[in-house]
Structure formats: C-alpha cells, structure tokens
Amino acid sequence: MPVHNNDIAAVFNQVADLLEIKGENQFRIRAYRNAARTVDGLSQSAADMIAQGKDLSELSGIGKDLAGKINKVVETGTVKLLEDLKGETPAELSDLMHVSGLGAKRVATLHKELNVTTLDELAQAAKDGRIAELEGFGAKTQESILEEIERLRQEKQQRTKLAVAEQYAEPLVDYLKQAKGIKEIVIAGSYRRRKETVRDLDILVTCKKGSKVMDRFVNYDEVQKVVSHGRTKSTVLLRSGLQVDLRVVPQVSYGSALMYSTGSKQHNIAVRKIAVKKKLKLSEYGIFEEDERVAGRTEQEVYKQVGLPFVEPELREDRGEVEAARKGKLPKLIEEKDIRGDLHVHTKRTDGHHTISELVEAARKRSYDYIAISDHSQHVTVAGGLKPEAVREQIEEIDRLNNHLKGFTVLRAIEVDILEDGSLDLPDDVLGTLDLTICSVHSKFGLSRGRQTDRILKAMDNRHFTVLGHPTGRLINEREPYEVDLGKVMRAAKDKGLFLEVNAHPDRLDLNDIYCKMAVGMGVKVAISTDTHRIDDLNYMRFGVGQARRGWLRADDVINTRSVTELKKLLKK
C-alpha cells in the first residue's frame, strides 16, 4: 500500500510528541520535527525516491539514521521507536499536544495528576473543574482548553489542507489515466478553485465507451471503503479519510458538468439566474433552449451562451465575479510565471537548512531574478535568531556574493520580530543597512484586538518597516488567527507605502483570500513569499499564487513581479 510524505511526517511528529512528553533531549526531538517538515515539503514522494534508489540521507537534516527510519515507514507504516514509545507512554497523549496552550510539560502534568489520556478525558476534567485546581493552570486556562477541544473536534470532520490533498489526488489521477479509453480527467470542486482546504475530491472523466475506469477506481490500493460503485458514478473513502467521487460524463456535456462540479454552488446559482432571464435552462448536462442543447461541450461555450466571458475557477465564489464579468471588469489574474523572485527565505544561519549560495542556485533554476535572505532576528531564540553583529556579517557575505553574480541579485533582508510594545527587534542602524524587512508577530498572540492592532501600527511607524509578514499569524487547522483590525492595518500600509505578505506556506496561506481582495480594494500591494526553510519550499509559490488569484490579485498588485531595479525603487518609496 503506498505511503505518502504526509504519512511519514505524521509518524515522525508523533515520535517527537511522545519524546517531548517524556522529557527527552530537545535536540533529538527537534531532529524528528525537522525531518517531518523536510519529508512533508518534498516535491517528490519519498517512497518513489527510495524506489528509484536515491539516498535520502543526502537530504538536508536527514542523516543515515533518519533515512533508515523513512525506509522503515515506507515498508511497514511505522518504526520500532514509535512502537516502543507507545509501550511506555499512551499514544493518545500526542493528540493533547494539539490543544493550543498545552505544551509537553502540561500534558505530562495532566496525565500524571489527573490520569488524563484522551481529548474526551481532558474535556471531562475541564468540565469538572479539576484542571483549574492544578498549580500553574487556573480557571482561564481551563476555559481556554474547553474552547480548544471544541475547535479540534470540529476539525476532526475537518477539511484537508490543499497541499496534503495534493499528495493523494495527483497519484490517484495518474493511476486513473492508465485506464484504457480515458480522454479527459480533471479534479474539480474546491480543489480546482484552489481553496486552502478541501472536504473531498470530485474527479470528472470523459472516456470511450466500454472503459473500465470505474472498476479501476474502486480497486485502487488506497481505497479503504467503497461507498458506491456505479457505471457513471462511484464514491470511495481513502485510508487517509478523504472521500473521492468519480463521475463519467459524455463529451457533449463535459464543460457544463465541469462547471457544475467545480462550483461554488453560489456561483452556479448566480450564472443560472442569468440563463433563466435569457429563457435558457442551465444544468450539469448543458445549456438548453427548450429541448435543444445549445452549449455544454466546454466551459467557455457555457459562459458565452449566457453572455459572460470565461470566469477563472479561483474566482467562482459569488463575491462579485459574475457582475464584474457582465461589465467586462474581471481582473487578469496573476500567474506563477509572473513572479520574479522570493522575498522571504531562511538560511542555515537561523532555522533554514541551506547556504545562501545553495538557495541562489535553486532560485536561478526557477528563472528568478532575485531572492531576499530574511533570517530571523534575535528575539526568536528557538530558531537561533541573529543578533546585530551576526546581521552585519550576513550583509557582508551577501555583498561579496553579489559582486560575483551576473543576472541575479541577493537582497539584504531580515524577518524582524514585532515586540509586544510595537518596537522592532533590531536597532535602526542595523535595519537601515537592509534592502527590506519582513516584520512579523511571533509571540503574545493572545493580546486583545485593540492591543494587537496598536502593536502592529506602532511598528509600522518605524521608517525601516517594509512588509508585514504572515499578517494574522494563523496556522490552518492548528492555530486560529490572532485578533487584529486588518482594516486599520491596511489603511496605515496604504498611507505609509508599506506592503503585506501573502505567505505561501500551505500551513499558513496568510493573508487569506478575503483579505487579499480587501487589500486590492484598498490599493495595498502585497508580496507573495514562501517563507522557505528548505529548497523544496520554493515550490510553495504555487499555493501563494493560488491564494492571490482567489483574492482577485493581478500581477501589478504584487511587488515581487517587478524587476529588481523596479522593486528597489518601490521599496525606497
């Protein structure tokens, strides 16, 4: 049975959780967490790499021991260390580590003092008031734990992150393409609209008569349960928990079926209303004038028949796109090829895994013109944040490298922390030597909306502030965004000529699509950046671009679509 990168990462993360609860060495714990991130971020399946005879120990942060463990997970689905740990520490305790505010020490205390092992037992202990009685917890923490458990329970029926869904969707499509008689195959639904999470996968197929694609589908290795098996529609549950629906449609209805399956429901209703006014009937089978099908073979002809230009899938959320289409005012959305460089890249000097030269080589392979080296500042001690002297040393290294580079520029930057009082984490005489700053909140997420907003606004008063990094601090399905008035923040950015980041890391995608559209409406430009820590992370740009497209962004709305000369002029303003 195939093992995906996400499966390997889950094993390593559980090992790290159980080691941390036991109070083991922090370096060992970090090694497993780093390995989980490395594997999960690979652009290729680790299992495929092993099958091709590649040495995984050559990956950054993966030595011989961890490479051997990856092999074991691919072979058996687990590793001996994890099974040993489960024998010493209840495996369910790792679930408690996902409750915001509960670190390993608190989980260990709850288990020891209250015999709490599962989320249900934790919830009951909170309802009984027993957690508040423990030293170092209190009533406020108890209440927060209950709220977090409720959030986690809702997320158990949760939608899957887009990047994780990709790991299961793309191999399945490749597998289905091998069926005889396949003509076209596409994943529709929220996946095609590039939503940050998906609930299920909707696959649409056209094929020759007699194709065995349905039989092939239900016999896929990763199918845990066949919910239904029909001639034109089947539904399965994968062992990952993802539901997948496969529909076979006639070529004559492919466009209308694809539009219907892509959604959103609200968008389809809005288009159908226009069709009704034109005395047409629009359904998944086509557009009909009385009983005659007048369109349906392609999406383009469906839209044309109701008097609209083609609407890009990412825009189909009934947020004004139909009216804009009627008026000829749909934006020409940004494409990944428009990106000229990445402005948020970490190196080995802090918590990255590569040298500047290695990152430059990788960026050049992507046909970029520049990258900005933006390691952490000193406040982020867990990441080995840079003190002022270390920043100066890195600037000198960048300047030396730029003297030898042709047709490529390394920009001097820093991801500088916005401290609780709104000051920046490095002195002005250091910040003033940089080309740009990514200014981010990494602590005190629990401040009130007013205090958090004031904190960021004060930081934006610093003349060396350039870009607000991951502006709401959220981690999808893991951490809620902190409270902040982004309307005020965007107005300040507009007034001061500052920028907001669309962090393309698939765990963040921050700004979200709603705020991207809000930024466009207010005339605030953004930087789409990957927050790269490993070379493969540069591939995350596609997620950031997808998010930006959902937010109606054009190439001109994004500062890193400029040449380096144009970008530097924009940054100086």
Image (cartoon, grey):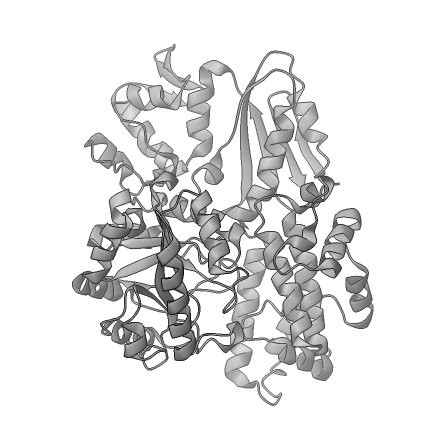
**Where 237 sits versus 352, above or below?**
above
Q: Can residue 108 be seen from the camera position used here?
A: yes
**Where 138 sits versus 417, above or below?**
below
Please identify the quadrant where the C terminus is shown: bottom left
Residue 277 in picture, x, y percent from top left: 25, 24
Please identify the quadrant where the N terminus is shown: top right
- Image point 44% across, 47% down: which residue? 543
**Where 345 sits versus 406, above or below?**
below
Task: Pick whichever, 372 or 382, lies toward us.
Answer: 372
- Image point 23% across, 63% down: which residue? 493
- Image point 32% across, 32% down: which residue? 311
Q: Can residue 453 be seen from the camera position used here?
A: no
- Image point 26% across, 53% down: which residue? 567
Location of residue 336 (image quadrant): top left
Location of residue 270 (image quadrant): top left
Residue 171 in picture, x, y percent from top left: 62, 36
| Residue at the far front in the pictured view | 404
Left or right side of 547 for 188: right
Left or right side of 20 for 351: left
Task: Pick whichever, 216 or 538, lies toward us.
Answer: 538
Residue 482 in picture, x, y percent from top left: 40, 68
Location of residue 330 (image quadrant): top left
Left or right side of 360 for 429: left
| Residue at the far bottom in the pictured view | 135
Residue 65 in picture, x, y percent from top left: 75, 60
Count of numbered marks: 0
